[in-house]
Every structure is written in structure tokens, then in C-alpha cells.
Image (spheres, rainbow, N blue to C red):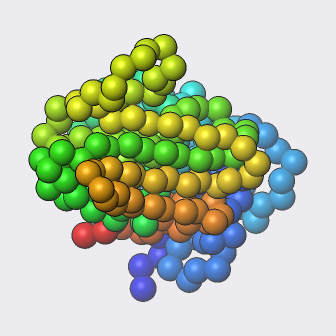
Amino acid sequence: MIMTRIIMSGCNGHMGQVITRIVSERDDCEIVAGIDKFRGVENKYPVYDEIADCKEEADAVIDFSAPSALKGLLEYGKRTKTALILCTTGYNDDEKKAIEEASKDTAILRSANMSLGVNVMAKLVTEAARQLDAAGFDIEIVEKHHRLKKDAPSGTALYLAEAANAGAGGKHTFVYDRSDRSEKRPDNEIGISAVRGGTIPGDHDVIFAGEDEVITFSHRAYSKAVFGKGAVMAALKMNGMQPGLYDMSAVLD
């Protein structure tokens, strides 16, 4: 059995601790080091402020931290040829370009959502849009998250919107607010609505609304463990992969 050695970036955050627990229950991987400036959490592995300070060798880095950590992660990945699993969202265009450039030197998997269910759903949405958009169905997305989530719409909602738009031939624009206009719904848009409240881990509905019928694809996350499990599976899959930019379809294949 191949033992995959993992560095957990953002190890003391909620997702970092979820992944720490998941890995501790497996016998095919281990966390050899963590990266986090925040302490206050006891781990069974060494924790460093910056990944550049990490002394342990690893096969993959899982990052659930913040975009501000990206530069150091990319430099580390290029220098050590360690696979990077980037689970953080909110990257700007320059950061996305930096990820693409770094993927020439090391394997990088980046996904807006690490849930296997969401990624299967995205494939189904693309296929549905190919047929339903041509039949005149309107496409709407509604996402719900906990009250502490800062970004809206979520990265997953945008990911699903892009999946639907790809199936529809890329002809739609995304609309986030209709309050400033009084007109019927245009045909060439995908509406995205965000709900924030309580402790909802993440709900996403992709609605295809046609004449006299509605088809809805739904995903409900009942805990953040679904994202952690997907990230660990990605780390196992990316161990030894050739340089390149991957998404969760590489894990599903």
C-alpha cells in the first residue's frame, strides 16, 4: 500500500481539523506537517507559520486557508515538485494566472468545491443544459450557506452556473440581482441567488424551468466532512501525477 504524505495548509482552521480527523482514521495517508499562523490547537504533527519553513517531505499539500497563502504554496510546489490541492476560493484573475503558470512545473488540482457529489452534479447539469436550454428552459441557481460566509454568490454556485452555461453553448450571462429593473426575464441569462443564515453548510439547487414543468438538481451538504473527504481523495489521486492543472474530474475518472 502506498502511504501518501500530506502537508495540511490551514491546519488549525475548521476544515483543517476536519481533514486531520479524516486522515487519522485512514491507513493509506498521514499528515506529516501543518501550516498555520494561528496556534491554540494541539496536533500530533509539527506546525509551521509558513510552508517555506516546513522541513518534512510530502507527496501532496492540501490548502484550506486563504488566497494570501497562494504565493508561498506555488513557490513550494515548484521547488519541491509536490502536488498542490487548492481548496481555497476567492482567487483573483492574477492569482488564477499564477496557478496556471505554476502547473507547468508541478501537479495542481483546483476546485471550487471538493465534494464528489457536487462535481458529479456539475456533469449532470452540463448534460441537462445541452438539451433543456435548446428546448427553451430557463436556468436559475439558488445557493444557501451559513451566516458567517463572506462571499456571495458562492464559488460552487458560480461553478454550477459555468457548467450549465457550457452545456448551453456559452451564450448566457450571469445575473445576481434583478431589483434595479422592471422587465420580463431575458432568455440569455442565468440567475444566481444567495441565501445566508444559521449554520447551513451548503445547499445548491440548479433549476431548469420550462413550460408546465420544472427539473431541479439539488445537493445538500449536511456537514463540512464531505469537502474534507473529497480533498483527501484528491491528495491520494494526485500523488505522482505529472505537472498540469487538474480539477475534480481527475478524481472521478
> Percent from the top left, x then y, of residue 37?
74, 37
**Residue 79 shows in this picture:** no
Hey, which residue is sitting farthest right in the picture?
Answer: 40
Residue 112 in the image, given as x and y percentages of width and height: 44, 46
Report the residue at 63% width, 46% height from top.
145
Q: Residue furthest top?
A: 180
Quadrant of the image occupied by residue 17 = bottom right
Residue drawn 87% across and 48% down?
40
- Count every numbered label the image shows and give the total: 0
238 vs 51, nearest the viewer: 238
Q: Residue at x 22, y 58 (%)?
A: 128
Quadrant of the rendering where the C terminus is positioned = bottom left
Residue 4 appears in the picture as rendered: yes
- Identified at 23% across, 32% down, the residue is 187
Q: Is residue 87 above or below residue 2?
A: above
Residue 174: give x, y in percent of width and height.
34, 29
